[in-house]
Image: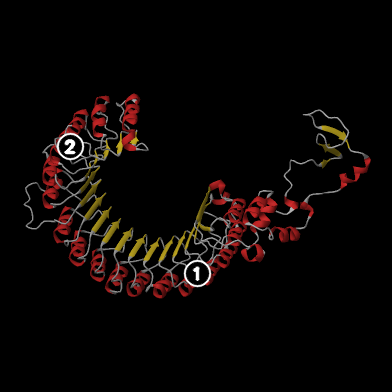
Amino acid sequence: MSGIFRFSGDEDHFLGGSLHLSPGSCAGVYLPARKRLRISAPSVFSGFEQKQTSIDVLPDECLFEILRRLPTGQERSACACVSKHWLNLLSSITRNEVNESVQDVEGEGFLSRSLEGKKATDLRLAAIAVGTSTRGGLGKLQIRGSGFDSKVTDVGLGAIAHGCPSLRVLSLWNLPAVGDMGLSKIAKSCPMIEKLDLSRCPGITDSGLAAIAENCVNLSDLTIDSCSGVGNEGLRAIARRCTNLRSISIRSCPRIGDQGVAFLLAQAGSYLMKVKLQMLNITGLSLAVLGHYGTSVTDLVLHGLQGVNEKGFWVMGNAKGMKKLKSLTVMSCRGMTDVGLEAVGNGCPDLKHVSLNKCLLISGKGLVALAKSALSLESLKLEECHRINQFGLLGFLMNSGLKLKAFSLANCLGIRDFNPESPLPSTSCSSLHSLSIRCCPGFGDASLAFLGKFCHQLQDVELCGLNGVTDADNIVSAVSICHGRTLESLNLDGCKNITDASLFAVSKNCYSVNDLDISSTLVSDHGIKALASSPNHLNLQVLSVGGCSAITDKSKSCIQKLGRTLLGLNIQRCGRISSSTVDTLLESLWRAFGNGGVTS
């Protein structure tokens, strides 16, 4: 490094008219071995009192020229530690302004940095820009601000733009002080951007998106969430220039409507694969355009589209352009009805996964129509769809294709218990492997018994928060007998009427179960003992008994015996298990768990 930068701060120097001399610096003068002699400077040095000898007296233009000629990135990083002033100057130097004879080879951009809350400041961004430029290059940057208290501005983004041309992934969250100027600098200096996430950045408008569209032709993934300044023109700019776009997510942007969304889908529908439209002021027009032009769309999420009616979903399905659609999620869309669901099933022959949440107009009729039309359907998830009853559930399972593997039902208040005397249908659902019923008050023992006999190959069963499921008629025992050789996971969390009888049945009949959750049930020490002494030598890997107040310290030895195969144990909220027992379990199971899989 040049001599001007070799000053370490520990050398002897003049200060305030006094001269500091090291021992032995004056010939013929005796000084104690461990003393530093302080003598008054003669009047000949008085002129130094009025002079500044620091390099800081140089104008910024001169400092800039010196700093950009430093031979290596390590020396630039070292100089950035001198002061905030030097750091800001160094962060303003672009790659093109570094002296060509001393430029370092730019990295591939494999470094990742994340700033959150108070740590997210312009100064830290400047340090990241200088520090990563010659250490592989910054490839991914996430900045999560703290709202109006955020200290990240366009200046900080400018520093990143100057020093990180290899940037590929940028996430800006909750940064009200960031605007079009900072985003434009990123767009011009970081043309390799592939993924951009803009969330709650009100200062960014259509101009910023237009700059991204003009310069970042490799953009493949774009998220715009709660950006009040972004409107239709920004989307139109993205649609015209970003031909590599594969995923688009737009949420809660009040200035975005049909003009922007429909244009984007018409222009990019042939290469877009993932589309998320949430809480937008759009109508059925946008869905009609999507249904016609979305020939490459495989994943579609529609949430809170209150302006879309039944006709919009009907047209989207009947346009028959979305033949590659594999996954559909619809939440809180009052336009999704039985008619629209049937149209989607008919128009999307490759549909495999459907999730319907708070679609209050969907009934069993729509489910049956979906089962008959979507022959490739593998999973269906229903949540808070209150018009669906037990007959619709049965009709769907009876008419579903041979590919259905998973069915989930949650918080559907229209479900009632089956009639125990109802005969079984002549057909069965042999392909279903996963069944999940959660928080459906009307679902009881008769329904569980019916599904247990109707579905022959269940591997994962989740029955959570079902007070109607009990041990009264040995229902769980019957299910364990039917599925003992296939059942791998059983979750009875929150079934408050399940007792030790269920564990006796599991220990006797289930050979393959490795994940068992009996949290918040009436299971006691006797049930744990039955598991530990199972004649089938259960290979349990995960056991959860959280909130089981009847389990006490007496189960310690049984849990230790089960611990030979356990990878995870949950004993939270077990008030009758003492802290000493917990410590003993931690110590004895530590070797099996490695990093400790006990949760207490």
- The numbered dot on residue 537 is 2
Q: CA distance from mark 1 to mark 2?
A: 63 Å
- Secondary-structure class at tag 1: helix
Is 29 drawn above or below residue 144 in the view shown?
above
Q: Is residue 271 left or right of residue 562?
A: right
Nearest to the eye among marks 1 and 2: give it. 2
Residue 276 x, y percent position in the rendering: 38, 63
Residues under numbered marks 1 and 2 in contact, where contact means CB atoms less than 8 Å apart: no
Residue 267 x, y percent position in the rendering: 41, 75
- Give whichever of 430, 301 is nearer the camera: 430
Q: Earlier in the sequence, mark 1 or mark 2?
A: 1
- Give whichever of 521, 334 is nearer the camera: 521
Is 119 drawn above or below residue 102 in the view shown?
above
Residue 351 x, y percent position in the rendering: 26, 65
Is 46 drawn above or below residue 579 in the view shown?
below
- Residue drawn 35% across the image and 66% down it: 308
Q: Amino acid at mark 1?
A: Gly
- Give whichever of 240, 291 is nearer the camera: 240
Q: Is residue 235 left or right of residue 452?
A: right
